[in-house]
Amino acid sequence: MEDFYFNRRFALKALLAGTAAPFIASSHAFAASVSCGDQIVRVAGMAAPDTLNPFATWSSFWPTTFTYDFLVGVDAQRHPERLGFAKEWSVDDKELSWTFKIWPGMKWSDGKHATAKDVAFTYEYLKNSIGMPDELDVGWNNTTGLEQVESIEVVDETTLRIITKIPTRWPLDNTIMIVPEHIWSSVSYADARGTFRNDPPLVGTGPMIVSEFQQGQFARLTPNAHFRKGQPKTAGLIFSFFPSADSIAQGLKSGTLDYGMNLTAAQWADLSKDEAIVVGEGRTEARNYLAFNTASGKGQGSTRALQDNAFRDAIGYAIDQKMIVERAFRGHADPGVGLVMPAASGYYTELEDIKRHFDLEEAARRLDAAGYEDSDGDGVREDMDGNPFQLELITGTGSGTIETPMTAIQLVAGWLGQIGIPVSVTQLDPGGLEARTASPDQGGGKWDLLITGAWLTPNAPDLLVLGKRDNASNNAYWHNGEFDRLASEVEGTTEIKKIQALVDKAERLIYQEAPYIMLAYPFMLDARRKDCFEGWGTEDMFSMWSYFPLDRLKAV
């Protein structure tokens, strides 16, 4: 199997768009068969952008990542040849003053100069909204981390200086898309977080510029004639959006697609037999997990047992992560352990000294010891209030994340039933899942168990975000003062070794408290055709973090 590689991708927190409408087969976005003559790259994924405004939605990464650059971001730190808006950067000895050198002579796609002023504008635009009624805190471009910034200074057209209040890697790690001041300076905060759709043609510094957008169908992109590395050699890109992987697999087989992601294991195996297709799988920062509703009061679940870490810990012994990988993911995942996934290799650990092992008898013994016994012998345990357990497990997949196979949910429900904890399953669409898992203050909660996935960056603060108090990603509603202190320290240092030690302590703490049981770290399964284009590369054939390889593809 050629070109086997690892690729990685942001994820997208919880992409909050609804399910995309089925793609219209008659659309001009698709060719009828394999055709390389127009030199337009055709790709597809399970994405559902509702607007191209990165300040208003989480769902616009595809396709806006091809048009807008990050200042640095994830890909540039992993791959020196994939730099974004900044050509180079440095920090002073006190780790408070960051200097970024912008590419000299760089231009926006409309021909206007792209300078350090545009970066400063983007960050100040966000920073100045903090605390206002229309704070820009709802989309991909958001205010998170900017409270740590003391000042942003334009030294000259190619030099930007960011002074932080505390040592932090935020200036490197943030994934804010840099937008042109001459376009966005006239957009109010209310419009930016609401009604402004940022209609095509967009103005960006990336290799491909969104020129047409049909919600639920596709985005058409054209080469940026002013791209800093030279205009791309292809004639453009069409990114098609699908609600399921079925159409993606069919498009790859027929030749109407050059590349597709979000494939199922069965589709991937089938496509691997086609000599015209190269398949790949890669570790991502995705985590699929079982969450307990630990809330008390508003939004709490059906039993107080969910708030008891002894109950949650016992359930952890009833989960066989290896079987989930083998049967639900057909081997295309790593078994779940703690908050940190193997893709974040600098922080990952197996937690061998505290790691639970699958043992239904041990799970039952621990439940008995914690006081959750089957006192009447009917096969169903009772909680501390004497009520028999009947837990509701809700599940669903946010748009753009890797789907949790139904087999995984069935396995978990079956194991819990075997230890006297009956479970009923409620499957939700992305909108329903978002509503049920919102904070109790926003009407969420009143469920017991949740199986879903999350996909954030490999940066240390994002690795811990599931446990941070009042964070929107904290689906378990869990909070712990010591965990929050450790997470805060992680955000306040740039020393990798110190960050690693803090992440390890925080991960061990939350693992033992068990508001989450990690099920698996799923791989991204994708494939490309060999017919029309070359230059995909053998590592990160299609980057999950930037525009790569659209800047270097060329016709066969």
Image (cartoon, rainbow, N blue to C red):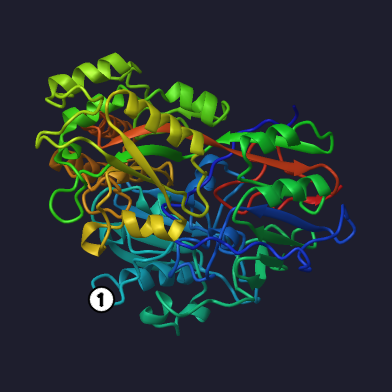
Q: Residue furthest bottom?
A: 186
Badge 1 crowding class, 10 Å Cα cut-off, few under 14, some 14 to 19, many 20 or more, is: few
Q: Residue at x 76, y 63 (%)?
A: 25
Q: Quadrant of residue 191?
A: bottom left
In the image, taking residue 319 as reference, residue 547 lies left or right, namely right
Residue beneath the point at 24% across and 19% down: 364
**Picture quadrant of residue 132:** bottom left
Tell me what residue is drawn at x 79 percent, y 68 percent: 28
Percent across and percent down for residue 71 are: 48, 58
Q: Nearer the viewer, residue 406 or 389?
A: 389
Q: Secondary structure at mark 1?
A: loop
In this rendering, would 112 be left or right of 475? right
On-image quarter of the N terminus: top right
In the displayed structure, 113 sits above or below 250; it is below
The answer to whether residue 444 is left or right of residue 484 is right
Can see residue 549?
no
Is residue 483 visible in the rendered image? The answer is yes
Q: Position of residue 233 (x, y in %)?
A: 79, 57
Q: Quadrant of residue 376?
A: top left
Q: Is residue 21 left or right of residue 499?
A: right
- Which residue is the site of mark 1? 132
How far from the left and from the top, in percent, is residue 208? 67, 63
Residue 42, given in percent of the width and then of the height, sits at 75, 56
Q: Please name the amino acid that badge 1 sits on.
A: Met
Q: Nearer the viewer, residue 232 or 34?
A: 34
Residue drawn at x 14%, y 41% as measured from the top left: 304
Toward the viewer: 120 or 199? 199
Figure label count = 1
